[in-house]
Amino acid sequence: MNTNKQTAIVIPIYKASLSKYEKISIDRCFKVLSKYDIYFVAPKSLETGFYKKNYTNYTIQFFDNEYFQSIGGYNKLLTSVIFYEKFSEYKYILIYQTDCFVFEDNLEF
């Protein structure tokens, strides 16, 4: 895990499991960006067994379910102080959506 606390990788999730392509995306994130602290951001009610089974070296930050019920709720979360307070120990955060694919780590650049 990241020792200098410069950057955190934040992955919003809202489903109990991932589709084939979402899993490829997240697997790649864990492979390429593993030197950083990785967080899943999830609704409080989410069953997380799939993530516990498939991934290690991460933390889950839970937020109220209302933030994950619509795009409007998600936008409200990403513009709220409460969201950024959870990651205030970091200088930077990368919000990594499940439809992304990272090719290499250029974050320090």
Image (cartoon, rainbow, N blue to C red):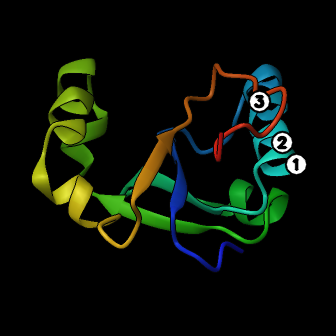
Q: Which of the labelled discs sits on residue 27, or is there none?
A: 2
C-alpha gap between disc 2 and disc 3: 6 Å
Precedes in sequence: disc 3 or disc 1: 3
Mark 1 touches mark 2? (CB < 8 Å): yes
Mark 3 and mark 1: Cα distance apart in space: 10 Å
Image depth: mark 3 or mark 1 in front: 1
Kind of residue indicated by mark 1: Lys
Residue designated by label 1: 31
Q: Which mark is residue 62?
A: none
Instruction: Give the residue type that dot 3 points to.
Output: Ser
- Circles 2 and 3, Cβ within 8 Å, touching? The answer is yes
Answer with left or right where residue 15 lies relative to residue 29: left
Which residue ends up furthest to the front in the rendered image?
Answer: 109
Give the alpha-carbon distance from disc 1 to disc 2, as whole Å. Answer: 6 Å
Q: Position of residue 19 (x, y in %)?
A: 74, 25
Residue 109 percent coordinates (x, y)? 65, 39
Where residue 49 appears, as percent x and y from the top left, is 68, 62
Q: Amino acid at mark 2?
A: Asp
* Residue carrying label 3: 25
